[in-house]
Amino acid sequence: MAARLDGRSAIVTGGARGIGAAIAARLVDEGAMVAIADLDGEGAATLAMRLSPDGKQAFGVACDVGSEADVASCVQATLSRYGRLDIVVNNAGMMTFKRIEEWRSADWAAVLQVDLIGAALFTGAAFREMRGGGAIINVSSIHAVQTSAQAAPYAAAKAGMLSLTRTSSIEGREREIRANAILPGAVDTPMLWDNPNIRSGAERIDPADVGQPEDIAAAVAFLASDDARFITGATLTVDGGRLARL
Ligand code: NAD
């Protein structure tokens, strides 16, 4: 049986490590050709070399998702390498911590630029280049709907991503571009364990509620594939059931 994503070309942002690295590996496994875009260009290139030593199915690109110029050159590099663009996974993200009275304009701008505007820039670039349909998957967070102290810009950006997903699905409909969001719960990556709310014990997580990056990657691969052809504008919570409990 042919792999689900055979011949499709994808960009995965923040793909050098954590959830993004698992997504890149899964998409390669399912047959896609993947541009791994990350601020850490060296890490992206190293992973690409590991996933596809001959470069046919993966290459690394240094890219700051918050920079319009970097986004444009990442898309162009993908098109010149693979000749098409079918899938964009907006996964790059950052989380910083302060109390609400301490946030200043520049702090808000820094987080929103990466976590929300970065996804918007890649979505716009994808809309300009996708031919014959496509899939956009926004890696949001359960912080889009419930949150904890000290993470106001992150939670706002992740909530904004749901709205971006909705608009993208509406405007993509005529061109068969689907857009969906994933809300991961706690996932075993550096971002989770660096979280000061978790380090201090202010936010408690049952070990059974911690998923693996591969759990998110499996959901992304599904939403990217034709198995999800009738799914657009949707949000899929992948949190092991954490949000559902009282
Ligand atoms: P991570 O910190 O382990 O990895 C993030 C990757 O994004 C890194 O490789 C980093 O270099 C890259 N990156 C950061 N800023 C960038 C920028 N401006 N341009 C390009 N690349 C950039 O994080 P993770 O846990 O793998 O998180 C991935 C995504 O999943 C994020 O959007 C995060 O908000 C979301 N998420 C994570 C969790 C979790 O518990 N780990 C939960 C919910 C949502």
Image (tube, rainbow, N blue to C red):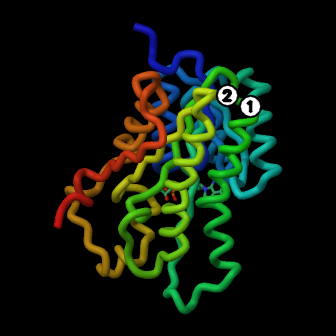
Residue at image mark 2: 85
**Label placed on residue 159:** none
Image quarter for residue 45?
A: top right
Contact, CB < 8 Å: mark 2 with mark 1?
A: yes
| In the image, the residue with mark 1 has its CB under 8 Å from the nearest atom of ligand 1 | no
Q: Earlier in the sequence, mark 2 or mark 1?
A: 2
User: Could you tell me which quadrant the N terminus lies in?
Assistant: top left
Q: Residues within 10 Å of mark 2 (few under 14, many from 20)?
A: many
Between 202 and 52, the one lying in front of the other is 202
The structure residue drawn at horizontal position 40% and vertical position 66%, both measured from the top left corner, is 193
Whether residue 185 sits left or right of residue 169 in the image: it is left
Q: Nearer the viewer, mark 2 or mark 1?
A: 1
Q: Is residue 49 visible?
A: no
Coordinates of residue 112 in the picture (x, y in percent) = 63, 66
Whether residue 217 sits left or right of residue 46 in the image: it is left
The structure residue drawn at horizontal position 72% and vertical position 47%, both measured from the top left corner, is 62
Whether residue 145 sits left or right of residue 73 in the image: it is left
Between 39 and 159, the one lying in front of the other is 159
Residue 75, relative to residue 121: is it above or below?
above
* Local SS, label 1: helix
- Which amino acid, by three-letter code, is at mark 2? Leu
Residue at image mark 1: 129
Residue 216, relative to residue 27: is it above or below?
below
Q: Residues within 10 Å of mark 1 (few under 14, many from 20)?
A: some
| In the image, the residue with mark 2 has its CB under 8 Å from the nearest atom of ligand 1 | no
- Which amino acid, by three-letter code, is at mark 1? Glu
Q: CA distance from mark 2 to mark 1?
A: 7 Å
Q: Residue furthest bottom?
A: 101
Coordinates of residue 236 in the picture (x, y in percent) = 37, 45
* Local SS, label 2: loop
Q: Is residue 105 visible?
A: yes
